Amino acid sequence: MSGHSGTACGATTWWAVLPDPFPILGFDHVEFHVGNATQAAHFYRSLGFVAVAYRGLETGSRDEVSWCLRQGEVTFVLTGGLGPDSPVADHVKLHGDGVHDVAFTVPDAEDAYRTALARGATGVREPEVLEDEHGKIVRASIAAYGDTVHTFVGRRDYAGVFLPGFTPVASDGTAGLGVRLIDHVVGNVELGRMDEWVSFYERVMGFTEMRHFSDREISTEYSALMSKVLWDGVGKIKLPINEPATGRRRSQIEEYLMYYGSPGVQHIALRTDDIVATVAAMQAGGVEFLRVPDAYYDEVRDRVPEVAGEIEALRTRGILVDADDDGYLLQIFTKPLQDRPTFFLEVIERHGSLGFGAGNFKALFESIEREQAMRGNL
Ligand code: FE2
């Protein structure tokens, strides 16, 4: 298991001096469509998220309930439908609980939307202005893989907590568990469609391919996948896209596609500066993580000497280690967070490495396959 299996693909920086043709300031928020937003919001507290805003019947929202949760710079919105005619209920019926919207903050949402459409994107929500006493925001949405959308949010003229229509929730005094920002958001797409979505992000948003991983690099005895990583060139946005590759049994990507019912967001990586403390606190709150066999740690000491002093803490928590030419990273993955074996979270601490843990893929996938086998899906 080498930590050097990622292949850098032409990461030049010449465009840094040119005006950005598709400026994105960062991830704005991620919205999940769920069966019961109120209970899901309670679960996300065990991951360190704190409710900051709400909309529902009490605030005049007749069709949907949303809890806006925050930790560091990460904003998650959990939305549930209030009746059978709600599009949220349709989304949940088809996909189970899952990510509907990966929203980006942009300087000008109308401009982003028009540019995206001119470059071949499909519009799903025309630009609209939302206003309240804190100002106004402009938003518009385009289609991404499956039923996933990207909303462009222009919040230059807004000083409220989240969006107009949301009422602030009084702080409960908790301070989070150390999560600072979204490191990357990973999508699973169907066999043979990865390159189509890579070119979508290249063409529409001007992203470039940062790395790719072949099925030879990411395979176990049973299954394989291929992955390409798109990024904005500076690192605020990193979007890996996976597709299944042919293996002897059903791969984890195929299991995802079967239960999600379409392509969609597989996992979101949350960055912390102290993964041992963050994960210990999440585990104390009942969050379950995947484990690799203990033997994994015997070879980590040789593979990544920088972590020699921390091995016992990492082993206790089940945290994985990988290194490349730029440095190393520590990472861990939760089990699926909902009934269906679909969406999960990663927690990651980076020390120079810009990678995604390719050196851990094999050990990790074998761990996922043990869980798949228990579900009768391997
Ligand atoms: Fe990841």
Image (cartoon, rainbow, N blue to C red):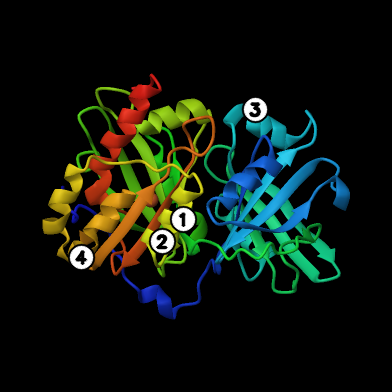
Answer whether labels 2 and 4 touch (C-beta < 8 Å).
no
Q: Earlier in the sequence, mark 3 or mark 1?
A: 3
Q: Distance between the residues labelled 2 and 3?
A: 37 Å
Disc 4 is placed on an element classified as: helix
Compared with 281, 105 (above or below) is below
Q: Distance between the residues labelled 3 and 1?
A: 33 Å
Does ligand 1 reach within 8 Å of label 3's beta carbon?
A: no
Answer whether labels 1 and 4 touch (C-beta < 8 Å).
no
**What residue occupies the far bottom of the structure in this picture?**
17
Q: Earlier in the sequence, mark 2 or mark 3?
A: 3
Disc 1 is placed on an element classified as: helix
| Location of residue 103 by image quarter | bottom right
**What residue occupies the far top of the structure in this picture?**
376
Q: Which residue is drawn at 47% across and 50% down?
A: 284
Instruction: From the viewer's side, name the closer residue of 45 and 184.
Output: 45
Whether residue 6 can be seen here: yes
Quadrant in the picture for the C terminus: top left
Q: Distance between the residues labelled 2 and 4?
A: 16 Å
Which residue is identified by label 3? Answer: 93
Going by the numbered disc 3, the residue's amino acid type is: Lys
Q: Which of marks 1 and 4 is nearer the N terminus?
A: 1
Tally of marks: 4
Going by the numbered disc 1, the residue's amino acid type is: Ala
Disc 3 is placed on an element classified as: helix
> Which mark, residue 277?
2
Instruction: From the viewer's side, name the closer residue of 274 and 2.
Output: 274
Going by the numbered disc 2, the residue's amino acid type is: Ala
Does ligand 1 reach within 8 Å of label 4's beta carbon?
A: no
Which residue is identified by label 4? Answer: 309
Q: How far apart are marks 1 and 4 (CA)?
A: 21 Å
